[in-house]
């Protein structure tokens, strides 16, 4: 009998991780592709359909298999915020030939990857931001992820724009002095008067390297005790606190349950200053509060694989073994 597989896909704003897992031999294969978020693709939904076709084709070709050998799949993609998007992109996945799959926002992968009992709250701080939770009964909810419409205050893009705004205010509106001028100037290799223009061009081109450098510049200013940089990071921390509590209340967790909160995304995992995480922990942990906060120790795609395994009828004990096997990918 030929090997059968499950497939997990985690698509963020800058990259897509996929893991093909063999159900018989337990071998796993990690693939990395560019973004599969329609909001980050110049061609939007039209380009996304081609991206999904290419991803599935490359994965199948790499193991000399067909889509029929993949018995269950889970796609966790950023930019899935409304039912109409889920329907549209589900049709695209079906056009690749895959069947028996689930499609959800990428934030939910964090719950599946890091919350051992299958319930909890995940907060994403990557290119953008989103908070989602699953309660003991399996009820779920997602907050944020819509940018200005949902009042998002998180993610690298928001953080950098607030920093550039602080420089702009200082230059033209008599705003307070800030080390962000110096740090962003170094990141963009320009003088202070050109920071706004250079940052605008970086976002216009979606220049990932420059955007990453600007994010590091904000953390660097905070490391040097710059008040404006700290204010930005703590405002972001407060936003996550408010939304974590809101998800908790909306899902009606058992008051006696300690709810795991997992922090995922590049800005949480690789952020060079801990101010955001410290702010979150200081406000929701301890003193009888129901939350236990941790930074994710595995790639969110592990949660996608575990969700596919759950759909395939694999037991909770066996899924623990799969998670352990995938911790190092």
Image: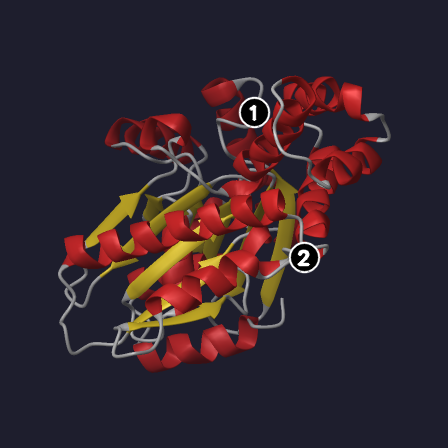
Residues at discs 1 and 2 in contact (Cβ within 8 Å): no
Q: Position of residue 132 (x, y in %)?
A: 32, 51
Q: Position of residue 130 (x, y in %)?
A: 39, 45
Q: Is residue 212 above or below residue 148?
A: below
Drawn side of residue 70 relative to residue 200, left or right: left
Between circles 1 and 2, the one closer to the viewer is 2
Q: Which mark is residue 49?
A: none
Q: Which quadrant: the C terminus?
A: bottom right
Identify the residue shown where x is 56% and y is 25%: 41
Earlier sequence position, callout 1 versus callout 2: 1
Q: Residues within 10 Å of mark 1 (few under 14, many from 20)?
A: some
Identify the residue shown where x is 34% and y is 34%: 90
Identify the residue shown where x is 30% and y is 60%: 311
SS of the residue at dot 2? Answer: loop
Q: Which residue is mark 2?
A: 272
Drawn side of residue 207 relative to residue 240, left or right: right
Distance Cα–Cα, label 1 vs label 2:
28 Å
> Is residue 113 in sight in this rendering?
no
Q: Position of residue 161 (x, y in %)?
A: 58, 30
Q: Which mark is residue 41?
A: 1
């Amino acid at each position: 009998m030929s090997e059968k597989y499950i497939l997990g896909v985690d698509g963020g704003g800058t990259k897509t991780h996929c893991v093909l897992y063999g159900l018989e031999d337990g071998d796993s294969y990690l693939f990395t592709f560019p973004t599969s978020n329609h909001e980050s693709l110049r061609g939007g939904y039209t380009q996304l359909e081609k991206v999904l076709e290419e991803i599935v084709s490359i994965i199948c070709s790499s193991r000399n298999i067909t889509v029929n050998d993949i018995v269950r799949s889970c796609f966790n993609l950023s930019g899935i915020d409304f039912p109409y998007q889920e329907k549209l992109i589900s049709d695209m996945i079906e056009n690749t030939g895959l069947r028996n799959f689930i499609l959800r926002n990428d934030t939910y992968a964090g719950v599946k990857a890091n919350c051992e009992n299958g319930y909890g709250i995940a907060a994403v701080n990557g290119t953008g931001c989103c908070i989602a939770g699953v309660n003991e009964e399996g009820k779920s909810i997602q907050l944020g992820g819509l940018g200005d419409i949902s009042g998002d205050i998180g993610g690298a893009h928001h953080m950098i724009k607030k920093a550039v705004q602080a420089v702009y205010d200082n230059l033209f509106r008599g705003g307070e002095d800030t080390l962000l001028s110096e740090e962003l100037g170094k990141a963009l290799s320009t003088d202070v008067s050109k920071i706004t223009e250079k940052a605008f061009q970086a976002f216009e081109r979606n220049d990932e390297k420059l955007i990453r450098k600007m994010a590091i510049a904000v953390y660097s200013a905070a490391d040097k005790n710059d008040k404006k940089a700290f204010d930005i990071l703590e405002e972001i921390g407060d936003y996550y606190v408010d939304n974590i509590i809101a998800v908790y209340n909306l899902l009606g967790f058992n008051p006696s349950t300690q709810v795991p909160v997992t922090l995922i995304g590049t800005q949480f995992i690789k952020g060079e200053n801990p101010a955001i995480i410290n702010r979150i922990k200081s406000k929701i942990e301890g003193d009888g509060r129901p939350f236990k906060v941790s930074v994710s120790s595995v790639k969110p795609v592990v949660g996608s694989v575990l969700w596919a395994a759950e759909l395939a009828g694999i037991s909770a004990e066996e899924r623990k073994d799969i998670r352990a096997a995938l911790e190092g990918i």
